[in-house]
Amino acid sequence: MDSASTTVPFIVVFVTVPNREAGVESVYWWEEKVQSDAEALLIIKTRESLLDSLTEHVKANHEYDVPEVIALAIQGGNLKYLEWLKNSTGEN
């Protein structure tokens, strides 16, 4: 995969889900306040073009009223992995 073929925009999507049984502790600091939740973080790698569909699927199937779905662009990385991701997500 050369630089000319990396024009397919990929994203990383973070989705939190409850998992109190596993005892995963998350602590967030904000203006000297602490929010602590037992959640697990799913990291989903897919194409930017599939984000709307993925978001709707999460909203329809998640137990939270307002599930966290945040997408970040992949700016670079292992080209062989990005080629694998391109082939795995079904679009050319």
Image (cartoon, rainbow, N blue to C red):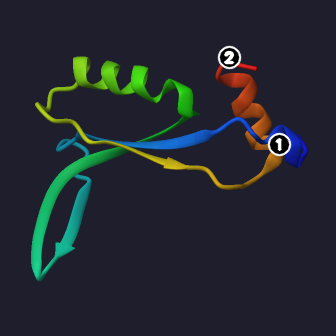
Which residue occupies 76% across, 32% down? Answer: 84
From the top left corner, tell me how far across and down residue 5 is, in percent: 84, 38
Direction from residue 57 to residue 28 in the image, left or right: left
Residue at numbered disc 2: 90
Quarter the N terminus occupies: top right
Which residue occupies 17% across, 44% down? Answer: 20
Which residue occupies 33% across, 19% down? Answer: 57
User: Which one is closest to the eye, mark 1 or mark 2?
Assistant: 2
Q: Residues within 10 Å of mark 2 (few under 14, many from 20)?
A: few
What secondary structure is found at the residue carrying circle 1? helix
What secondary structure is found at the residue carrying circle 2? loop
Instruction: State the CA–CA distance, disc 1 to disc 2.
Output: 16 Å
Foreground pick, 10 / 80: 10
Q: Could you tell me the amino acid type at mark 1?
A: Lys
From the top left corner, tell me how far across and down residue 47 is, in percent: 59, 31
From the top left corner, tell me how far across and down residue 11 is, in percent: 55, 42
Q: Quadrant of residue 30?
A: bottom left
Residue at numbered disc 1: 80
Quarter the C terminus occupies: top right
Foreground pick, 28 / 7: 7
Q: Could you tell me the amino acid type at mark 2?
A: Gly
Q: Quadrant of residue 67?
A: top left
From the top left corner, tell me how far across and down residue 70 is, in percent: 36, 45
